Image: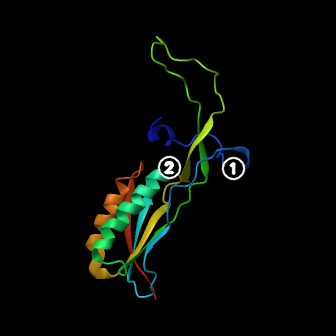
Amino acid sequence: MHGSNYRQIKGMAYTSKKFAPGAPQLKIAKFTGGAGRSDYELLVSLVTQERAQIRHNALEAARVSLNRVMAEIGETEFFSLLKVYPHVILRENKMIATAGADRLQEGMRRAFGKPVGLAARVEIGKTIIELKIKKVNLDKARQAMKRASSKLPVKTEILVTDIVK
């Protein structure tokens, strides 16, 4: 199945791993990147513009691409933070389509399915990634956020705010 099949939010969130044996492990390696210092001047945020579910591998791809672009200015010149956590267990009722079969398996209607991945549910206006930088690195931060947003299945906007000290 494609990731687009899980984008819409349908029904209640299925989050209990106690009842889902074989739930996959989280693919997000780290939720932070860079160096946490107190002298950053700007906060650049990637904010959603629609309601959806974002799979854990999409979040990891966005985080890696953002950190890769920001590493060009130096590991100590930024601090990134992934703000969402994928709690929702995604299930799939796998159908058999074997060679030689002239039609797909019908299977049980509305079957429960096996766990295939994890996703984070986001609402409109939810911050996905935050990036703290100095003002001289604003262009690089915008470029990094644009690249990270291309990995996500939702429309996003980049917000820049001053950090009040």
Residue placed furthest toward the front: 99
Q: Give the residue type that dot 2 points to.
A: Arg
Q: Which residue is mark 1?
A: 17
Q: Which secondary structure, mark 1?
A: helix
Q: Residues within 10 Å of mark 2 (few under 14, many from 20)?
A: many
Q: Residues within 10 Å of mark 1 (few under 14, many from 20)?
A: some
Q: Position of residue 25 (x, y in %)?
A: 58, 52
Rendered residue at 69%/44% (across/down):
21
Rendered residue at 61%/54% (across/down):
87
Q: Give the residue type that dot 1 points to.
A: Lys
- The mark nearer the N terminus, 2 or 1, is 1
Q: Which residue is mark 2?
A: 55
Numbered disc in front, either 2 or 1: 1
In this rendering, is residue 107 above or below 66? above
Q: Which secondary structure, mark 2?
A: strand
Instruction: In this rendered view, identify the residue nearer to me: 129 or 103.
Output: 103
Q: Position of residue 148 (x, y in %)?
A: 36, 59
